């Protein structure tokens, strides 16, 4: 019988009777004291949590069902139950009332869906986003049906188009901050990790091929008021995976005792981490800074750039010069970023992976009432780094591969299902991986940038 004792996160293998006595001595802190005695052979355990009035809430699990005493235990009763359990005496179960299999199955069936529903956006947030879309439609209709003039500027219409996206971002941030604030007052319980693994999250945006991201997934169970509850949310903001995937799984290994934060009004709304995700402030600052810089650049291109071009090139085709030069700068920046990334990728380590599926995927795009159809290779592969499993669909790093069906099928044919493959992965973020390093792509970007600069110079009259 392999026993392990956990007292407030400190583990003792094969504990003695003296270990139990020391655990209860010294009036444990009722706000955070807990004890878990585990039998690793059969999955059974006894959990003891200190109550403010000096008694103890005790929960037993025989590996199949959960048991609870008729009333809270005293310290002597709790120690006696632990000693009987440690000695494998058949009578240790007699102190508990055990759930029937039907009750257990019902709790298993209902716990996880409720946890998923708790992560859905609040009604007020959905209403605000819908209202912003409605406002854009109504405003556009009113302006088109009346003679209201907004001058020669198109900034109002551009702002109107981007309004719903800005509202969506702001509402999402506010909703999460409010949830973090509410969670600060949630109750706590001792829980246990029952599953810890990675999961492949498939996402597909309109006009894009399906992308796969590896996410950490942890399931845990805890007891509230004599009822076992299961949860699967790690944090308030959700776990985005990425570079933190391995660290998250290391924190939540199977069998580990954890502190679960739960809403007293709905214990199925629970998380393991209730604070603001680390780095979110820095991330928001970067996004806001980028948006401000983008708005500033667009404003200058619309107001200052025309005067500058006209001053130096009076006969220039001003709109074409500005657009071509701007796109040239953008392509040049992409070239520099691609060149730097390609040099880094050349030093990435290789690991052997396996192709899980191989085929093509149809990609439909709609623009100005027109529909275009292309095909992308759909190659999903698995690989393992530092004992953590990852899944990806990225073939060429940082390159979207979408063309004719024959091209996509040709790429897929190089990676048949079940084939062993070499996977390049980022050692700082193993979830970022690719099968190929697109060396030639960056020179294409440089050629496009040069062509755009040449077009801008020609339209400015520099060759006249």
Image: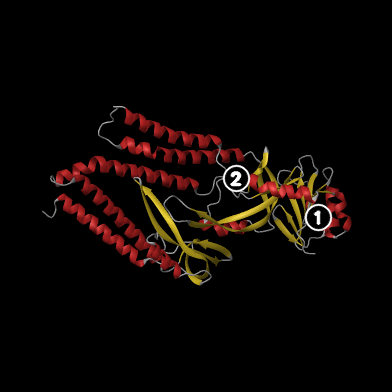
What residue did someone put label 1 on?
20
Q: Residue furthest top?
A: 147
Q: How many marks?
A: 2
Cα separation between marks 1 and 2: 31 Å
User: Which of 291 and 114 lies nearest the eye of the viewer?
Assistant: 114
Residue 53 occupies quadrant: top right
- SS for tag 1? helix
Does the rendering let one see residue 270?
A: no
Horizontal side of 51 relative to 259 (left or right) equals right
Does the rendering let one see residue 233?
A: yes
- SS for tag 2? loop
Residue 30: x %, y % from top left: 74, 43
User: Which of 175 and 109 lies nearest the eye of the viewer?
Assistant: 109
Residue 102: x %, y % from top left: 78, 49
The disc at residue 464 is none
Q: Are marks 1 and 2 in contact (CB under 8 Å)?
A: no
User: Which of 275 and 323 lies nearest the eye of the viewer?
Assistant: 323
The disc at residue 274 is 2
Horizontal side of 444 relative to 276 (left or right) equals left
Label 1 neighbour load within 10 Å: few <14, some 14-19, many 20+: some
Residue pictured at 52% horizontal, 55% vertical: 202
Residue pictured at 60% horizontal, 58% vertical: 249
Horizontal side of 79 relative to 213 (left or right) equals right
Q: Residue furthest bottom?
A: 420
Residue pictured at 26% horizontal, 43% vertical: 301
């Amino acid at each position: 019988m392999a026993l392990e004792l956990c007292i407030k996160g400190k583990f003792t293998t094969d504990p003695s009777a003296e270990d139990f006595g020391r655990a209860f001595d010294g009036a444990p802190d009722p706000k955070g004291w807990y004890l878990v005695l585990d039998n690793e052979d059969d999955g059974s355990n006894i959990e003891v949590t200190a109550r403010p009035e000096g008694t103890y809430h005790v929960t037993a699990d025989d590996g199949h069902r959960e048991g609870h005493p008729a009333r809270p235990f005293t310290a002597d009763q709790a120690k006696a139950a632990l000693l009987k359990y440690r000695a494998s005496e058949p009578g240790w179960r007699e102190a508990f009332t055990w759930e029937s299999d039907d009750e257990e199955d019902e709790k298993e069936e209902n716990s996880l869906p409720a946890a998923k529903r708790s992560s859905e956006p609040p009604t007020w947030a959905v209403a605000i986003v819908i209202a912003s879309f409605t406002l854009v439609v109504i405003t556009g209709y009113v302006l088109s049906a009346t003679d209201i003039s907004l001058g020669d500027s198109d900034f109002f219409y551009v702002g109107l188009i981007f309004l719903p996206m800005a509202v969506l971002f702001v509402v999402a941030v506010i909703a999460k901050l409010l949830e973090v604030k509410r969670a600060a007052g949630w109750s706590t319980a001792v829980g246990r990790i029952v599953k810890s693994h990675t999961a492949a999250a498939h996402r597909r945006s309109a006009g894009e091929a399906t992308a796969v991201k590896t996410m950490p997934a942890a399931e845990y169970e805890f007891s509230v008021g004599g009822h076992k509850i299961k949860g699967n949310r790690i944090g308030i903001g959700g776990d985005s995976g990425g570079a933190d995937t391995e660290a998250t799984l290391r924190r939540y290994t199977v069998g580990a005792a954890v502190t679960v934060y739960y809403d007293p009004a709905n214990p199925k709304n629970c998380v393991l981490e209730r604070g603001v995700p680390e780095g979110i402030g820095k991330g928001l600052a970067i996004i806001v800074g980028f948006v401000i810089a983008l708005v500033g650049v667009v404003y200058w291109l619309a107001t200052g750039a025309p005067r500058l071009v006209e001053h130096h090139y009076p006969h220039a085709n001003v709109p074409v010069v500005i657009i071509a030069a701007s796109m040239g700068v953008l392509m040049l920046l992409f070239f520099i970023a691609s060149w730097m990334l390609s040099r880094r990728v050349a030093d990435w380590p290789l690991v052997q992976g396996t192709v899980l599926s191989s085929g093509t995927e149809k990609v439909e795009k709609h623009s100005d009432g027109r529909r275009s159809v292309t095909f992308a290779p759909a190659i999903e592969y698995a690989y393992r780094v530092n004992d953590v499993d990852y899944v990806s669909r990225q073939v060429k790093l940082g390159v979207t591969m979408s063309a004719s069906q024959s091209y996509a099928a040709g790429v897929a044919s190089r990676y048949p299902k079940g084939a062993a493959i070499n996977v390049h992965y980022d050692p700082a973020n193993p979830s970022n991986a690719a099968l190929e390093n697109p060396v030639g792509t960056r020179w294409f970007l440089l050629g496009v940038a040069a062509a755009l600069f040449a077009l801008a110079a020609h339209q400015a009259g520099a060759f006249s």
